[in-house]
Image (spheres, grey):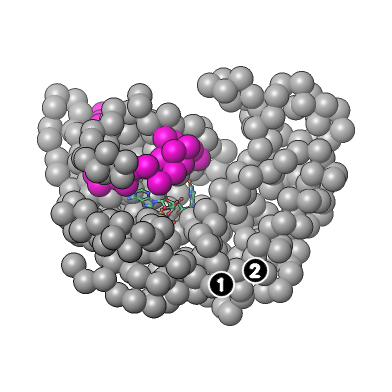
């Protein structure tokens, strides 16, 4: 393993923004991971873990410690009755994994087609889209515990998955994901509950896996910026979850606003994009090269050459305006690295 110095981080992210890492190591095995962490310990430096860089915004000054990019690869299959258990390296491309399991006729992650980043990043952020969430088929994970300096296996019940959160965000820095394990089904179980999928498959209630993947990829094309033309990290903000009482008050003020109950939290999810669009009328609003994406206002798109401070200034203005207008505090989904 080679530890590089003063490595520009922007090319390692989908925003294409940010300064250099003081040190940078790409680790392909658990031993390399340990070696890189020992190096950081020796120099008493902070460590930042990076996957595909599709859910981060790196500060313009970069990161003064060691950036450790997890590149652990490999996908193993074990058939067990009506399921296949798939063990996948944290550095594998998430969408490469989805495409590969679809080729093997395995159900459970097809609606999560087209999400950028690595398997490790997907576990950490508990990604979700079009009616499916990563944690639905997740069985467990091998992690490196940076406190005890040992490899551990965590069962799904220990991972505290929630809406875009997990033990890995709640106890940030403690664990590094090495492998994730998924239990995928051999039996067709299409989830077409998401409105756009319902419409597309109104005449075809049991589409094959590959067709669902293609439909999801097609829907996504219209919803996110083209990363070849501009930068983005997907939804910049989380949809806020408020109490039932707060949700009722919001509905009195904005009767057309959709709401989604979250039985697992006893709260109600408020579609922030709707508020940005229909209450603040800010869809497409831009500041300093960063703008709220026209087709989905939760997403920030950034022209080439935009600074991280411009993106943060836009995000802060949205946060302030939402608080002043609707009384809701919103959180970033994107992790800011500084
Ligand atoms: C165009 C676009 C569309 C998107 N659409 C969606 C969507 O539909 N649904 C959705 O949920 N997300 C979406 N995202 C967000 C993003 O793709 C996911 O959050 C993705 O899973 C992040 O993975 P990554 O490897 O890029 O993680 P990174 O961005 O590199 O890192 C994200 C966080 O995970 C940590 N991390 C990464 N790897 C590891 C590891 N091995 N061990 C421990 N910590 C780690 C990092 O430290 C950081 O805190 C989208 C992003 C873009 C750019």
SS at badge 1: loop
Rendered residue at 33%/63% (across/down): 43
- Residue 256, by quadrant, is top right
Q: Is residue 179 magenta?
A: yes
Give the mark nearest the N terminus, 1 or 2.
1
Q: Is residue 59 magenta?
A: no
Q: Which residue is mark 1?
A: 60
Rendered residue at 73%/68% (across/down): 286
Kindly tell me whether residue 159 is visible in this rendering: yes
Task: List x then y, in percent, for residue 138.
Answer: 32, 33
Q: Which residue is mark 2?
A: 309
Using the image as rendered, state which of residue 243 and residue 175 is in the foreground.
175
Using the image as rendered, state which of residue 123 and residue 207 is in the foreground.
123
Rendered residue at 23%/49% (across/down): 89
Label 2, residues with CA under 10 Å away: few <14, some 14-19, many ≥20 = some
Q: Are marks 1 and 2 in contact (CB under 8 Å)?
A: yes
Name the quadrant of the N terminus: bottom left
Q: Residues in magenta?
A: 164-188
Image height of 5 relative to 278, above or below: below
SS at badge 2: helix
């Amino acid at each position: 393993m080679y530890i590089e110095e003063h490595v520009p981080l922007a090319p390692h992210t989908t925003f294409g923004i940010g300064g250099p890492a003081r040190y940078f190591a790409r680790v392909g095995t658990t031993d390399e991971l340990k070696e890189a962490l020992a190096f950081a310990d020796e120099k008493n430096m902070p460590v930042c873990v990076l996957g595909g860089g599709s859910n981060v915004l790196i500060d313009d000054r970069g990161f003064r410690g060691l950036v450790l990019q997890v590149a652990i690869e490999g996908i193993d299959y074990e058939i067990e009755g009506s399921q296949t258990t798939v063990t996948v390296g944290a550095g594998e491309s998430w969408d490469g994994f989805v495409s590969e399991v679809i080729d093997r006729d395995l159900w459970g992650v097809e609606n999560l087609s087209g999400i950028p980043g690595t398997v490790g990043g997907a576990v950490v952020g508990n990604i979700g889209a079009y009616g499916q969430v990563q944690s639905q088929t997740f069985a467990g994970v091998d992690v490196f515990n940076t406190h005890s300096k040992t490899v551990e296996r965590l069962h799904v019940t220990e991972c505290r998955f929630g809406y875009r959160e997990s033990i890995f965000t709640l106890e940030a820095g403690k664990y590094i994901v090495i492998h994730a394990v998924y239990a995928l089904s051999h039996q067709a179980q299409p989830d077409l509950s998401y409105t756009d999928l319902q419409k597309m498959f109104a005449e075809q209630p049991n589409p094959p896996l590959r067709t669902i993947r293609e439909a999801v990829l097609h829907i996504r094309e219209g919803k996110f910026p083209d990363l070849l033309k501009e930068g983005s990290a997907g939804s910049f903000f989380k949809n806020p979850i408020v109490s039932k009482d707060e949700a009722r008050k919001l509905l009195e003020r904005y009767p057309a606003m959709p709401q989604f109950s979250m039985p697992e939290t006893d709260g109600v999810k408020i579609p922030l994009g709707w508020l940005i669009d229909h209450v603040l009328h800010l869809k497409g609003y831009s500041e300093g090269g960063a703008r709220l994406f026209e087709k989905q206002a939760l997403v920030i798109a950034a022209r080439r050459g935009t600074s991280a401070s411009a993106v943060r200034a836009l995000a802060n203005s949205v946060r302030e305006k939402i608080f002043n207008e609707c009384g809701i505090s919103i959180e970033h989904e994107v992790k800011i690295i500084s």
